[in-house]
Image (spheres, helix red, strand yellow):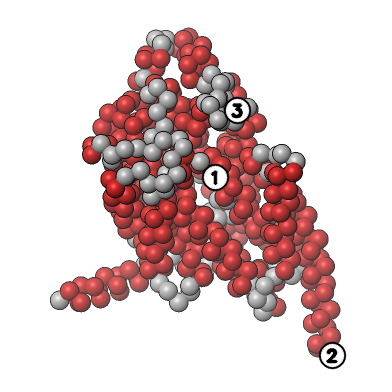
Amino acid sequence: MSNSILKRLDQRLDSIDEYEREPVPDDKLKGWKGFIGMYIGENTAGTEFVIGTLFVAHGVSAGDLFWGLLVGNMLAICTWAFLCAPVAVKVRLTLYWKLRKICGPNLAMIYNVVNGVMYCFLAGSMIAVSATAVGLPFHIAMPTLNDWLPTSIGWVIAVLCVGLIITIIAILGYDKVAHFANISSPWMILVFLAAGIAVLPQLGVHSISDFWSVANQKIWTGKPYPGQVKFTFWHVMFFSWFTNLAMNAGMSDMSILRYAKKWYHGFSPGPGIYLGHLMAWMSSGILTAAAAGAIAPGIIAYHSAGLAGAVCVIIAGWTTANPTIYRAGLAFQSVTPNWKRWKVTLITGLVTTIAALFPALVMKLLDFVALYGLVLMPMGVVILLDVFLFPKMDLKTNLANAANLKFNWAAGLTWFITLLFCLFLNLYMGVEIFFLSLPGWFIAAMLYIGMSVFYQRKYQQASYETAR
């Protein structure tokens, strides 16, 4: 009987079609409702408890924080709307299968493995965020700013439990991921807002007129914690712009926005970005100040909002990790095309949960997010140029697919040289990681155009000689 149940479950999971290798059909397309809730849930999430805290630790001033978030988040929304969404709606393929057509299976495999592993680390950090709240009733020792390794057996058990639940939801597919976010996001927003307001009297804010002076004196004081680099307006602006770089300019959200009916649904991250990356980051900074500099998200939220705050941290971690594991599963699915998506996602969830055991993923989150966007960005440039610029330049699109190439050297060298250039800027020119992606984007664009003109000319000549 147990074998029969397992067989039916396997058949049920196999029937979930996410169109991993073909365009999304018209009857599956979604409007605003299909995206706004998911983006609110993803961007008003566990990372917000960490990032807002780390801004305080890096000594950003109140004015630099507010204006940096206002400008940087607007640039991020425009990047989704004017770069990622038009590409996604035009091709209606996942990033991974579009890259396979452009780059060939060998280069795509390298990229997809790197992409999937980076997503596992990001989702792992969110599992760790949820675990800081799950462990509160059991008095589990929480990670500190300098912890790299698991701190206790209790921490390991809490992470494993959270990882299991998140993986199950991701296995059920995009509709379940979006539905879970739509249910959770309105409540999470209220908890963030209410908790931030509730602790203001503890800091000395008793009227609106008190807020700005208290913000400068007790919250965003402009003085970094010992051992932390001081942040300015430019750090905040570029970080808030590029915190989702892999998703928008890096084109990973093609996997999500391929379901959109129109390109302008690319503005759908807007509400989530301003609620999560402005209101929630500021709220978590306020909570950090009220909690006397505590770092663990669960402790911060529980200190300010009690049980509701702790539950909010748990749900917030889930709503970020769910779509991230879903994306990672799609990346690994393209490497193992004979495996069913749900099986790949299950393995992805296990890898992610193991990564979550190491609290350094949370404590070094600002640097990791910047690095992960930078690493994946050049291939987003490759896709954008292939879809919109190459037809106007009479260059062949989907070159690897058309010419049966295993490795498109123009794309591969663009990726590798761009990252080497950014590494040079960082190590030898002293450019911080938060500022590397903008020059990197233009370098990648110039490299890919120049190399493609040369490479395709050489390919056409070789084809002509073969035909003779």
Q: Residue 327: where, in percent of width, then height?
A: 47, 58
Q: Residues within 10 Å of mark 3 (few under 14, many from 20)?
A: some
Q: Are marks 3 and 1 in contact (CB under 8 Å)?
A: no
Marks 2 and 3, how far apart at CA: 65 Å
Query: Which residue is more in the foreground, 108 or 37?
Result: 108
Residue in the image at 39% along x and 64% along y: 347
In front: label 2 or label 3: 3
Q: Are marks 1 and 2 in contact (CB under 8 Å)?
A: no
Q: Residues within 10 Å of mark 1 (few under 14, many from 20)?
A: many
Q: In this picture, is 396 found above or below 246? A: below
Marks 3 and 1, how far apart at CA: 18 Å
Q: Amino acid at mark 3?
A: Lys
- Sequence order check, earlier mark of 1 and 2: 1
Query: Which residue is more in the foreground, 123 or 455?
Result: 123
Asked if residue 30 can be seen in this view, the reply is: no
Looking at the rendered structure, the secondary structure element under dot 3 is loop
Q: Amino acid at mark 2?
A: Arg
| Residue at the extreme left | 1
In front: label 3 or label 1: 3
Q: Are marks 2 and 3 in contact (CB under 8 Å)?
A: no
Q: In which quadrant is the N terminus drawn? A: bottom left
Query: Which residue is more in the foreground, 304 or 174?
Result: 304
Q: Residue 82: where, in percent of width, then height?
A: 63, 47
Mark count = 3
Mark seen at residue 230? 3
Residue in the image at 32% along x and 49% along y: 156
| Residue at the extreme bottom | 468
- Sequence order check, earlier mark of 2 and 3: 3
- Residue holding disc 2: 468
Q: Amino acid at mark 1?
A: Val
Marks 1 and 2, how far apart at CA: 52 Å
Mark seen at residue 369? 1
